């Protein structure tokens, strides 16, 4: 997504909830989109400090809350560790590498999602399904990532 499309999406989603875009919200949103690595608030804070040295960690948390509320990013909870943020709003699972702590998106097609919903007891109507797969990535993937 190019910068103008990103800004337009941010402005539209904020406006739909009665909010307006701010420089802080734009910088935080762009920091999440710049690298699809499911960063924590602290990692996002470190990224945005480069572009906006006066921003506070509290402001980053407030911006993240707004972005989640406006359906621009999702919160990803992995055990009792720091919340991570994911800009991928399509149906997908997460693979959590136990060794590195990296989180990867795993696409889920509509057939899989329909099958999961059908497996629920009668009268259960899920608003979302969160799937986290834990394990280790192969050495080949680690080598490929380290060469990038």
Image: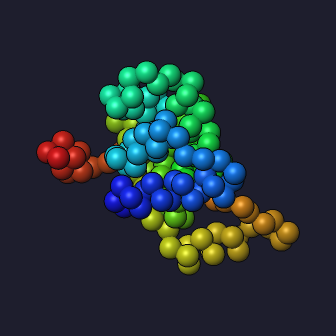
- In the rendered image, the residue lying farthest to the bottom is 111
Position of residue 39 measured from the top left corner of the image (x, y, whole percent)? 43, 38
User: Quarter of the image holding residue 27?
Assistant: top left
For this rendering, which residue is in front, 147 or 96? 147
Position of residue 9 measured from the top left corner of the image (x, y, whole percent)? 50, 59
* Left or right of 18 in this view: 32: left
Quick check: can you spot residue 122?
A: yes
* Left or right of 118 in this view: 100: left
Q: How many marks?
A: 0
Quick check: can you spot residue 77?
A: no
- Image quarter in which the N terminus is found: bottom left
Residue at left 61%, top 52%? 14
Scheme of colours in the image: rainbow
Position of residue 114 measured from the top left corner of the image (x, y, whole percent)? 63, 75
Residue at left 43%, top 33%? 44
For this rendering, which residue is in front, 94 or 8? 8
Q: Is residue 13 above or below residue 26?
A: below
- In the rendered image, the residue lying farthest to the left is 147
Residue at left 83%, top 71%? 122
User: Quarter of the image holding residue 107?
Assistant: bottom left
For this rendering, which residue is in front, 40 or 106? 40
Residue at left 78%, top 66%? 125
């Amino acid at each position: 997504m190019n910068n103008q499309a990103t800004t337009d999406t941010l402005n539209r989603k904020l406006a739909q909830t009665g909010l307006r875009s701010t420089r802080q919200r734009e910088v935080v949103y762009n920091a999440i989109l710049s690298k699809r690595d499911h960063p924590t608030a602290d990692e996002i804070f470190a990224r945005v400090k480069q572009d906006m040295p006066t921003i506070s960690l509290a402001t980053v948390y407030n911006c993240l809350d707004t972005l989640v509320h406006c359906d621009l990013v999702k919160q990803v909870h992995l055990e009792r560790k720091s919340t991570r943020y994911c800009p991928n709003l399509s149906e997908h699972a997460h693979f959590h590498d136990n060794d590195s702590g990296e989180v990867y998106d795993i696409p889920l097609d509509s057939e899989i999602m329909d099958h999961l919903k059908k497996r629920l007891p009668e009268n259960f109507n899920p608003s979302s399904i969160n799937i986290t797969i834990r394990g280790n990535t192969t050495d080949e993937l680690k080598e490929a990532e380290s060469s990038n």
